[in-house]
Image: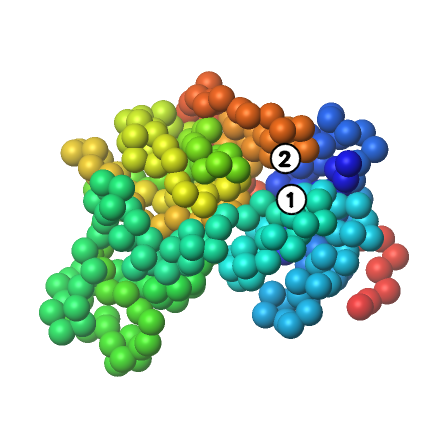
Amino acid sequence: MKTNILITAAGRRVSLIKSFSKELNKKYPEARVYAADMNPNMAAACQVVDGFFETHPANHPNFIQQLLELCETNDIGMVVPTIDTELEVLALNRDKFLEKGINLIISSVDFVKTCDDKAQAYDFFKERGFLVPKIMDRSALSFPLFVKPQQGSNGIDAKHIITLGDLSENIMKGDGLLFMEYLDHNTHDEYTVDLYYSDKGELKCAVPRKRIEVRDGEVSKGLTVKSHLVNDIIDKLGAIKGARGCITAQFFMNKKSGKVYGIEINPRFGGGYPLSYNAGANYPKWLIEEYFEGKDHTYYDTWENNLLMLRYDNEVMKHNYRGE
């Protein structure tokens, strides 16, 4: 059985890589964790693995073939993608990996497309019984409001518009933008929830992380919180057709009323997952046990409550570097 693991688009995901290495080593001491990136020499996570590979961007015509060949050559039995731009093409080609005994941890094409389109994601939340911010027609705007691309991630091009004077002509005429109700951080707490779904789309864990501080679209200070949000998720998201592995969902909760608004859902590990891992939600271990050993996990809810994460910059040194 092939038990090596490949993390794609590794970039700065040092903590995620280390968690997979730690858990894999416990089960299979001889197995290796590899990383792939378009520029691995400049990717911090590629310096802390057993080996790394340079790969094409996801829109390259040979991306899938290159990835398959890397997996076969290096006895890789699991591939874990981490970036939105790769998800759809990988989902479309998942069967090609399965045919070669490679577990590609990716949700179904339909679910990936739903997550990628913010308007479709809102419909998904509404159908499941969550509130969502109101989407406004450009001819009937009310302020303050929030503008963000219908497709995209990491808060790129998302803007808080306070008054009409803040609304530029470029924004008003911009393509692919959603104008929506603004949920004030003074009256709402923001949560990212790390969800684990089995290969059958069954929810096995949900860990809400309160986003205390965010930098470049990724949480820098966060807190695990057990609240009614967990019960809401169990009731409304207990099973999702096509969901697989780690899914991150973003919610706003009104501080007074407790009303919950669904904001975004992404079919991949989130940048703040290390907080959930250290709280006891061991998704790397569960993936290894489920896909390498066929284990069916029971629902897990004994993760540590009120665990605070304070992230900071660290360094990875590469000796005798001679340039690209």
Mark 1–mark 2 distance (CA, rounded to whole Å): 7 Å
Q: How many marks?
A: 2
Q: Residue at x 25, y 46 (%)?
A: 127
Provide the residue designation for mark 1: 103
Q: Is residue 272 left or right of residue 79?
A: left
- As shown in the figure, which amino acid type bears the numbered disc 1? Asn
Position in image of residue 8 (x %, y %): 65, 53
Tell me the element at label 2: helix
Q: Residue furthest top?
A: 302
- As shown in the figure, which amino acid type bears the numbered disc 2? Tyr
Q: Residue at x 33, y 33 (%)?
A: 233
Compare residues 250 and 199 and report the one nearer the observer. Answer: 199
Position in image of residue 212 (x %, y %): 39, 40
- Image quadrant containing the N terminus: top right
Q: Is residue 279 left or right of residue 293?
A: left
- Image quadrant containing the C terminus: bottom right
Q: Is residue 27 left or right of residue 259?
A: right
Q: Which of the two labelled residues, at mark 1 and mark 2, occupies the earlier sequence position?
A: 1
Q: Residue at x 61, y 52 (%)?
A: 95
- Determine contact: label 1, label 2, CB under 8 Å: yes
Position in image of residue 159 (x %, y %): 32, 63
Q: Which mark is residue 291?
A: 2
